[in-house]
Image (spheres, grey):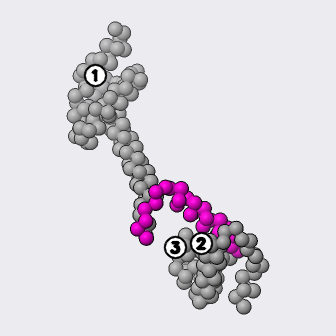
Amino acid sequence: MTDDSRRFTGMYDECRQRVWAYVVSRAGRQVADEVVSETFAIAWRRLEDVPEPALPWLLGVARNVLRDTVRAEARREAFGAELRSWTAATGDGVRRADVADEVAERLGVLAALAELPEDDREVLVLVAWQGLSPRDAARVVGCSQATFRVRLHRARKRLGRALENPASPRPRMRNLSEELS
């Protein structure tokens, strides 16, 4: 047995129970074994960095490993929740069987939106994606609230037509003010 092996074995025998108790007190028994194993794996890899006495250093490593474990679990849960939201029931109660349905729908909306004139896109984005009220969006565009509502209504109608007929060519408006008159 080498000196490093003897030192590590002595440190392990002396500190393992206390490190395990510390982790159990912070996170419970379910994760304690995994965190303690990772803590001592780090100690073995960094044996030259472990000071005497080793316990405070080991507890600090265990604390960091536990923190990283909790963060990783939170990321997994968030990812799982996002996946579940993609397959959740829609407003009409129909459950989507495949995420591809929603992706295809989004792509269809984006393609239809791309067919619209820039002014229509801006009006729709301000309300739908930026969440502005028509009054606030009118301030952004620099028009009255009534004018903005008319523009929004027309943009929604054109978007609806673009969604119904995605392959049909759309004539581009040169100037939105020409249509408003």
Farthest residue toward the right? Answer: 174
In the rendered image, the vertical position of residue 76 relative to residue 39, given as above or below: below
Q: What's under tag 2, amino acid-wise?
A: Val
Which region shows up in magenta? 92-117
Residue 64: which quarter of the image?
Answer: top left
Is mark 3 in CB contact (under 8 Å) with mark 1?
Answer: no
Relative side of 137 to 95, left or right: right
Relative side of 147 to 96, left or right: right
Q: Nearer the viewer, mark 3 or mark 1?
A: 3
Residue 159 visible in the snapshot: no
In the rendered image, the vertical position of residue 66 relative to residue 141, given as above or below: above
Farthest residue toward the top? Answer: 1
In the rendered image, the vertical position of residue 79 relative to residue 35, given as above or below: below
Q: Position of residue 4 (x, y in %)?
A: 36, 14
Is mark 2 in CB contact (under 8 Å) with mark 3?
Answer: no
Label 1, label 2: how far apart the Cα atoms are: 60 Å
Q: Quadrant of the N terminus?
A: top left
Residue 109: which quarter of the image?
Answer: bottom right
Residue 150: which quarter of the image?
Answer: bottom right
Q: What's under tag 1, amino acid-wise?
A: Tyr
Instruction: Pick the residue in front: 103 or 122.
Output: 103
Q: Nearer the viewer, mark 1 or mark 2?
A: 2
Q: Which residue is mark 2?
A: 125
